[in-house]
Image (spheres, grey):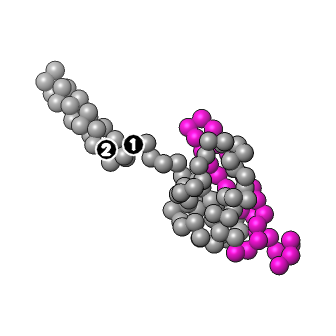
Amino acid sequence: MTEANKICVEVAFALPDKQEIVMLEVMPGTTAQEAVSQSDICHHFPDLQLEGARLGVFGKAVKNDYVLHAGERVEIYRPLIVDPKEVRRERAAKAKQRRAAEKIG
């Protein structure tokens, strides 16, 4: 394949205070993991550990060997710090306490 056959994709990573989207031209058949490696996104995030990182395409998790299509964006997901189910449980408990307090007061 020639350079003319390349497809455009993006690789994205974000922290709470910083995000970076790297646009790439890759050969058809390039996997999500290969695109992440080619993007050199670690240049922008020196502490980013790509080993074992979960990847997604437009918000849907994909395996590292997922073959990219033109225009797709590979997202590198950060590990969860807090279990989302636990956060929802705590929020619901606080709301319940507030409602009970309002009934009393």
- Residue drawn 65% across the image and 69% down it: 31
In the picture, measured across the screen, residue 65 lies left or right of residue 28, that is left
Where does the image place residue 105, in percent across and percent down from the top left?
16, 20
Where does the image place residue 89, in percent across and percent down from the top left?
27, 43
Residue 105 lies, with reference to residue 71, above or below; the image says above
Residue 63 lies, with reference to residue 100, above or below; the image says below
Where does the image place residue 76, in percent across and percent down from the top left?
58, 54
In the picture, measured across the screen, residue 50 lies left or right of residue 7, that is left
Q: Secondary structure at mark 2?
A: helix
Residue 31 is tagged as none
Q: Which residues are magenta?
A: 1-29
Category of crowding for the residue at label 1, using alpha-carbon neighbours closer than 10 angstroms: few (below 14), some (14–19), many (at least 20): few
Q: Are marks 1 and 2 in contact (CB under 8 Å)?
A: yes
What residue is disc 1 on? 82
In front of the other: 81 or 19: 81
Quadrant in the picture for the N terminus: bottom right
